[in-house]
Image (tube, rainbow, N blue to C red):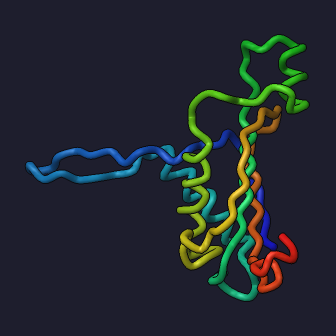
Amino acid sequence: MVSFVVYGEPVPQARARVTTNSFKPHGYEPEKSRNYKELVRLIAQQNRPITGLLNGPIKLQVDVYRSIPRGFSKKRAAQAEAGEIRPTGKPDLDNYVKLIEDACNGVIWTDDARIVNLIAGKFYSTQPRIEVTIWQISTMEKEGTAL
């Protein structure tokens, strides 16, 4: 099992932008998501498996903890911190997950196509962060005896 936490306000994977340079289309990733992806990559490198890159089936859990909105009353903020109120608006959960998957390619696993089981959630917290947990699925788990 590999786990790590990226502290700070979570940033989702942004869509690639396209610009023209000398009449040729050129794609680029927005700076905010590029910088956050690099932060995730650095933290993942510090927690990489000793045995090398994971190459078999992988189970990934990503828990995204966003800041509690300033407009929440004290009562609503307490409910949000307790998990009774969850973020339902944008950005979409899958955009956070995609950033984590891309950042861990070549660092934790050989390719994010190895992910066969995904658990993810969005929450509110006074301490914004993303918690990532990764399991290499063993032969027994693949046979359905444990997971």
Check the image and name the residue furthest to the front. Answer: 144
**Which quarter of the image is occupied by the C terminus?**
bottom right
**Picture quarter containing residue 146?**
bottom right
- Left or right, 12 with reference to 25: right
- Left or right, 145 with reference to 86: right
- In the image, residue 90 sits, relative to residue 48, either above or below, namely above
- In the image, residue 132 sits, relative to residue 88, either above or below, namely below
Measured as percent of width and height from the top left, residue 85 is found at 81, 26
- Left or right, 25 with reference to 137: left
Instruction: Decide which of 42, 108 is in the foreground and name it.
Output: 108
Identity of the residue drawn at 72% across and 35% down: 66
- In the image, residue 77 sits, relative to residue 100, either above or below, namely above
Instruction: Decide which of 17, 84 is in the foreground and name it.
Output: 84
Instruction: Decide which of 63, 67 is in the foreground and name it.
Output: 63
Measured as percent of width and height from the top left, residue 37 is found at 55, 56
Check the image and name the residue furthest to the bottom. Answer: 51
Identity of the residue drawn at 86% across and 32% down: 83
Identity of the residue drawn at 75% across and 77% down: 137
Measured as percent of width and height from the top left, residue 127 is found at 81, 38
Query: Is residue 7 visible from the viewing direction of this image?
Result: no
- In the image, residue 84 sits, relative to residue 95, either above or below, namely above
Looking at the image, how many numbered discs can be counted on the residues?
0
**Which quarter of the image is occupied by the N terminus?**
bottom right
Query: Is residue 12 visible from the viewing direction of this image?
Result: yes
Identity of the residue drawn at 82% across and 32% down: 126
